[in-house]
Image: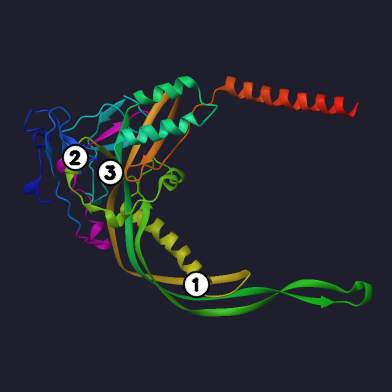
Amino acid sequence: MNNSNLKTADDFKCPGCGAPISYDPATGGLHCEYCGYEENINKETSDIENDFVEGQNEDNNWTAETKIIHCDNCGADNVLNAGEMSVTCPFCGSNHTIMTNQVTGIKPHRIIPFQIPSQNVKDAYRKWLRKKIFVPRKVKKQIPNIKLNGVYLPIWTFDSNASSSYDGKLGKYYTRTVGSGKNRRTVTEIRYFCISGNKSLFFDDFIVNAGTKISQQEMNAIAPFDTNNSFVYEKEFMAGFSSEHYSVRLNDGWNIAKGNMDESMKRAILNDYHYDVVAYLNVTTNYTDIKYKYVLIPVWIGVYTYKNKTYRFIANGVTGRFTGKAPVSVLKVLLFVAIILAIVILLFVLTQSADA
């Protein structure tokens, strides 16, 4: 978006009643919850890849329209549109947040907007809790009152041509019979063979998590996020939402991606052969025409406290797929164990009586 098209804080106020308007996942546009006003958002789908070398100098082009709120409790840095305020951290629920002078850095190139309303996620989580017999009843009743925060998480995507030369030694198991008479037996041995050659691959939209507040395990649990269905970033998509500021910088993101690409190349090479064991494999890879994108992906985060302990669940903002933990009632667990023991004892007594 050009600077001449940037919207100010007043542009995200309803022209009908003056209340704040926010992005509505249900309609895919801006919506005023007070008077019902709606406004469409430009959804540009053109996919422009960005040169990696040039991107290393693109480090301060998002500052004018955003600000960073820091959480003193969990350390999260959350990006908001310049005219918006947030006093609660979406990651841990703490109110100990302050505005910082930190620059927001590279402006996102693409965004995957929210498509699932928060109520849908809350209903799915509540249904999941009902199936958990050890979750306290109080928690199950508490869920409808929990506020979900919509947060965009930062990821880097990388495209690259990869050309590799390799050499190695692989082995196949085979069996043969040795000895004679009573000592005759079958043994398993390895027949080795040498390999060498060249391999080329193209990596498209290779994803690297650029944040730290959502673990890779949690990300995997709510995946996938289809970057092919993203739009050119417009700040309207963030109206009423926030995003985690990237803590993995572009260069570091590429190093992570390259390491994973190296492993993918090795697997691709090995897939060309029939083998059982790898004695060694040396691969030298040259990466060219490296492109990147900074993409924001949507998640709903719910945070609540039970007996002074914080619990969090996270959902994919497109599919609604979620992951999380829930409190366990010690009393319910003990009661369940007692019932099982009682059944076991009863069966034992009945068995003994029948034998007698």
Is residue 75 visible in the rendered structure shown here? no
In the rendered structure, find residue 202 and report the number of the disc placed on it: none
Q: Looking at the picture, how far across and down is residue 203, in whole percent?
A: 37, 65
Name the residue beneath numbered marker 3: 115
Q: Is residue 255 magenta?
A: no
Tell me the CA gap for discs 2 and 3: 23 Å
Q: Quadrant of residue 348?
A: top right
Which of discs 3 and 1 lies nearer the camera? The answer is 3
Q: Looking at the picture, how far across and down is residue 21, in whole percent?
A: 15, 33
- Name which residue lies at 36% across and 36% down: 121
Tell me the amino acid under the disc marked 2.
Thr
Name the residue beneath numbered marker 2: 66
Is residue 97 visible in the rendered structure shown here? yes
For the residue pair 142 and 355, the one nearer the viewer reads as 355
Q: Residues within 10 Å of mark 1 (few under 14, many from 20)?
A: many
Judged from the image, the secondary structure of the residue bearing numbered disc 1 is helix
For the residue pair 44 and 117, the one nearer the viewer reads as 117
Start-end of magenta stretch:
46-74
Name the residue beneath numbered marker 1: 269
Tell me the amino acid under the disc marked 3.
Gln
Q: Which comes before the other along the chain, label 1 or label 2? A: 2
